[in-house]
Amino acid sequence: MAEIQAVRVVPSGKIYRQIFDAEVQLVNSLEKTKAEAKPTQLKTLSVPLVHDGRKTMGESLLSERQIEWLESLPNDHGTENPVLYRHDIERKVERATEPVSTLAAREVRGLADSVEAEKRGSDIIERIAESRRLRHEEAIEDMHQELHLIADDLEPKIEAEGETIIQKLEKNDKEIEKMLQKIADDKDLIVYSLAALNQLWEEVSEQSIVRRQWIEKMDHTVNKIESDRLFRIRSTLKTYAKKLEKIAYQMPPDVQRLIEKESQVINQTILNNRRAYSDLFARLMKSDIEREKNHHRIWETRVADWRQLNTDVAIKQFTEYMQSQEVIDPPGVTVLLEDMQSEQKILNHKRLALLNSLRQMKPPNSTKTAVYQWNKDISEVCQQIEQLHVRYLGRLHQHYEAVCKGCLEQIDKHKEELMLSGVCDEDRCLDVIEQHFLPQIGERQRVFEEILEQMDDSLEKLSENFDEQLRSLFKFSQGAAHLWDIHELGLARRERDLQEQLEECRHDHDNVNQDMEANLDIIMDRLRQESSEDTLGDTLRKALLMLDKIQSSYEAFHKEQMEIVKQYPSMVKQELEKYDFSVCKFYEVDRIHPSDRKQMREQEVADRSKRTTPTPVSRRKMRSTTPDERSGSISKAKTGLEPPSISSQSPVPMAVKEVLSTAKGTTFYVLTVAGKHGISEEEEKGDKEEKTFLTETGVEGVGKMQAHTTKNVAVPNELFVELRKIMRMEFLNHLEEWLDGAVERGNSVVAAKFEELNSELDLRLHLHEPRSKRAELDIHNVRGAELVMHSERVVRHSKGISGALNDIKVRFAEMQQEHNKFTDKFKEDVDAMESVFIQATKSATLVMLSHQVSSKVEDHMNIIRASLRQFRQYLDDTLQMLRESNARFIKSFKLFSDGGNFSPEEVDTFKKKLEKLANKIDSAEGFVMADLEGMEARRLEQATEIANKFEDRFKHHLFDLTFIEKLTRWLTNTQVKVKGEVAESNGQAQQLMHHLNTLERRIDACEKPNLDKEQVTPGQLLDSMKDIFQAFDDRAQYLHCTKHAAYRTSASKKVTGDKAGKVGFASDGQSGQQTAPQTITLTTLKANKTQQEDAAVTLIKNILSSQKMKARQGSHGDGEKEPPSSSGLPRPPGTQSSIQTEDGKLKSTLRPPPKMTDKDRARTLLRRSTSMSMDSNPRRSASGVLRNKNNGLKFDPKYYVFGEKLEKEIHYMATNRRILQESLEGLLTTADLYYRQKGSRPPTRPEAIHESFELCADVIVTKLQSYFNQADEYHNQCLQEFREQLERLEKAISKVPALVVQEVFKGHLQKSRSKLESVAGDFSSRLSHWDKKRREHKTLLRPTLGHPHNKNQLQTLCDSEDNRKQDYVNGIDEHAQNLKDLAKTLGDEFIQDLTSTGEKLLALFDSLLTMDDVETGRVDPKRLKTSALIRRKQAGLPLEDKEYVPLIERGPHVWMGVPLDQLVEGERPAKPQLSSAVTSTKTTLGHQSTVDARNKAFQDYLVAFDSKLEEIEQQKAEQMTAETRWSDSWHKSVCKVKQLY
């Protein structure tokens, strides 16, 4: 701004000097402060962070337009001016709200400035102009003065703010230096933790934040002061602008231009001031950042020193730990060694106990099993000792590993401490551990492994020595046990030889005894099956003789076994001698001194030479001794021992080493070969090995730990020698005791055997003694009793069968007497019904009585049949029971071979007697069945004769009543059928009304949808139209009212032929023509009611029963032929069965004739008798049958008032006519049949039956004509109602096409909108990508890119922007074209769908039946009142109503198509191309409504299509305009950047 002393306007391009001086002063102070605080500064090329902070702040708080204003360069013409933008908005708002008076004032101001006065010569104008000039200049001078005052008021505030910020920054620099001095010394530094160091730096960083807040506050303050200056200047300029306009020295535009010029100068000055403020803010922030970086570098250096100091401390602590006593000599190892020694003592004590157990090793306990068990136990103990050593060595190894693991845990602990405290990161920690920690652990682990290896070697050698001694002792014990086992086997073999000799003797005896027992069994079986008393005695004597022979064989067997047992003691003595020799040889002892032994051998040789041949012995003794000698030779071969006289000789002289004495005083000499010492050699060898082992241990230098480990498990060799000597002595003592005990044991065995053999003999004799007595009592006597019992049983069976046959004859006689009583009672009951039959007034009563007679006959016969069935059942059961009993009795004769007690001779005798009984049963059955054969027929003939005599007396009453009821039934059924057709017609009319109401309701729901109404769509409404049209067509066909031949001839094939007979019955409707064979079923009115037999049939049966004998005589020649004409007559309603027409005879010849029942025979006789009566009836001509024989009619043509031929059509009137034709035919036929059968007799009921056929026929025709007239009147009423319904239908459906076409139109609009939106959504992602690239380019365009060094970067950025622009433009064009193409495609689909919908509707309405397509019918003239007629005459109108006027012009019509080439961009063709025209067979309101709705939908879619194309073009233009503006702004910004340098 200007200085305070002068008031002037600063020229353009200058700045206020005061502001510039203040800025220079602030910069100098800042430079001085930085020089004092930081003598050395680091140079950096980094970009200040102020720009990023501003950008971030702008993005979070300002809009994109404001960000663009903020980031643009000063005086950038390509950037929008926010002030102008605001003024432009305000101006538009003012113009929009400007009143009419202001517009008029502006027009007045637009008049000419200079107006010539009419009066000349006055200077008032000049004086006014001069006055205005002076005031104008004063106002301008006052304005400048006020602007100078504003500057003087605000500039001191700016200077004060600059001094304040300088003082704060200097004070803050001192505080930061004081904080960093705390970590300058290493002693103080090591005390800090990393968190404390970080906290220290956070405090320093907080100071930086405070400093930046001060700088930002200073920038905010000066900007606020500048804004205040701008506001005050704006107010001043507005005030003086109004003042100058009031002075009116210059025109208001000139005044505005003056003020605008002043404003432009002031604005440029203010902008320069703001640029200076921004530059000052940037410099302050940059210097503060440089200061913060320098402080951070110092802090990081001290942190690295802190890390190294803490690392050295950790290494020192770990080294001290590795040299500690708990690692070098762990206390747990000593504890483990003590535990191992204690457990060694326990297991070694157990092993010594097992070794000492050999002291008691003597027979009989010294078996191989015991020796093996002892060896297994001591091996297990040795194995436990080995496992103990392995376990404790493993535990020592684990303990040493635990020590090493503790060292590793110390490493992990130091690592964790270093990492948690932040001294080292993970990589640095690994380097420290590998270099300083792990080598110490490896050295200590090597020492531990050497200790464990030495201990393992010493224990292994000790174990091997003991195992060798143990194997030697085991072999010695095994040899001793082998001697005892061989001796036991020898004794067992001797005992087994004894048992084999006994078994051989027993086997020979058993074979002989088995043969004698078999012979005895054969004799006993013969005794059991004898068939007479004499043969029984002879067989008994043979059996007793055989029993005596068996007893003698038992005694001889006992003597032979006693001789065998006496040889056992000598066999035992031989085995004892062998055992004594084996023991002495094994232990190298002898009972005789060697010198005495030599003399004994010489004497033995001399004795052998003198010995003679042995005397012969008995055969059995030689056989017993031979196995002993054989077994002795075998035992010698197995043991390898020979007698001392042979095998003990040796070339080396034997010497007595030691003399042993047993407990009994026996002396044994221990022999040895000269120069060898038996057990003593083993002892010396063991001592030598032990000495060698100790010597080796001393050489290896095992330490204290190895000595303590092996001393508790060592076993002396002297113990093994001592155990051998003790075992030898124990065996010799046992040998002396066993020689005496074995002999005693052999004698006791012989005594026990003797006692056992004696007991066996006593038992055999005891069991054999009662066998002879049992043979006599249990077999001989029992068989005699069986023979007597068999004979008595046959006699009893014969008496029982004879008694049962007599009972059958007695019961048959009683049944005959009972049937005679039933017949008498039936006759009395039938005679009692005569009074009721005469007084009956209805045929139903007579029929019921007739049925009662028949039912009584049937009941009577049922009783007879039931009685006969019961007797037959009784007879069959009784005879079957007797035959089965006889057969069972024969089967009960079982032979002994089948498990019974009959002999073959007995069976043959008894069977002959039972066959005679069977013949007697058959003869009794034939006698009774001969009487029963004709009994039922005789009883039925008696009952039928009684019933026929009763019915013959009352047949005329039943005949007349039946005729009356038939006529009544025909007329009633006719009424029911006619009313049924009326109900059918009413149902159709109601159905049509329901369709119309539903159609109107649905049309209203589609036109005005509501939640309370039915939810239906036009498509569903259209689908329901076919069913409605079909219902109306069916109604027209049923009423037979259409005018066109197509409607008359198209009878509905859905209606079946049973419609005419659905009420009462059905008829074939054929008259005089030959048709295919067919069966007509006559049904009743109610299907669920049980059909009863016709009364006429009952009457005919009664007639036939009276003429039964004559019919039988006349039926021989033609009984199987059909009557010629009666079968073709229609049957009255209510009959039960179905009959065949006359044409059905042809069909009956193709298959075999069925078997005729009683009812069929009766009908055949009825036809024959009727035909005969017609030929002989004098009144036959009254019925008209003969008079109309030539024209083929049954009756006179005057009676055929409804036509001579049966109606075949199925519409309403035809159906009624056919019903009446069938009823007339049936009534006349019934009457004719009655009058012909009645004959000349008077009717029993003259008040109800006419005298002749003609009178009756006239009454019938009159009654049926009244029915036809009523049906015709009802048909006319239905026709008028149907025409009204057709008119209502046509008016209703005229609303449907608009709804259907509108649904198609809306559906296509929705489809078009969704597809276009989908394409636009896909394109929006591409737009977002291009906008993102544009913002990136905008961000990358910085002022530094204008430097020549960054020329390539700028060029690359510009090329990227050009590529983006080209892609953008191409994408917009392509997107617009795609949208247009899609709109055209969718339009074509709409036209195609619209055309097909229209054609579908037109085709549908062609099938609509209109009111003009049906007949008018009989319309009664409308009767008007007299007053209405007078008014019509006065008005010149006709007095009667005109004829019917159609709703629309009817007839065929050609409907034009839809234009196909109108949905195009630009000019549309003058002559459109239309779709194919549609030709309809008729014209209705629906056709016209369809075409109108189709054309309207096409026009609406054409308008929507044009608007969519305009929208696409407008959107494209907007996007291209925005891109053009951005491109211009981009080029201007690039030029400005280039101009900066």
Image (spheres, rainbow, N blue to C red):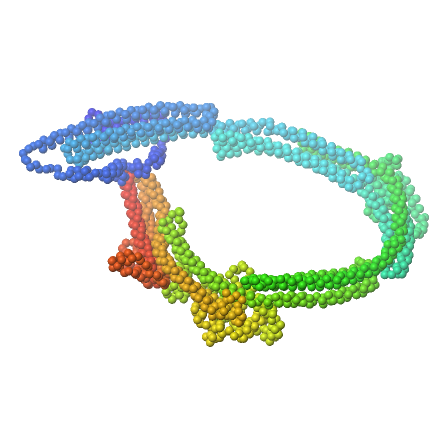
Which residue sits at x=70%, y=66%?
932
Left or right for 279, reference 721: left
Which residue sits at x=27%, y=60%?
1438
In terms of depth relative to the viewer, which is nearer, 533 or 763?
A: 533
- Please tell me in which quadrant of the rendered image residue 1343 appears: top left
Q: Position of residue 668 (x, y in %)?
A: 87, 37
Left or right for 729, reference 1426: right
Q: Position of residue 1152 (x, y in %)?
A: 58, 71
Q: Position of residue 1475 (x, y in %)?
A: 32, 60
Which residue sits at x=71%, y=61%?
874
Q: Indicate whether 439 appears above or below 889.
A: above
Tell me the quadrant of the picture where the N terminus can be found: top left
Left or right for 880, reference 1533: right
In terms of depth relative to the viewer, which is nearer, 1247 or 1200?
A: 1247
In terms of depth relative to the viewer, which is nearer, 501 or 712?
A: 501
Q: Indicate whether 275 appears above or below 761.
A: above
Left or right for 1147, reference 6: right
Question: Which residue appears farthest toward the left when viewing the image?
Answer: 121
Tell me the quadrant of the picture where the C terminus can be found: top left
Q: How many marks?
A: 0
Q: Is residue 613 visible?
A: no
Q: Position of residue 765 (x, y in %)?
A: 89, 50
- Please tell me in which quadrant of the rendered image residue 360 appears: top right
Q: Is residue 807 visible?
A: yes
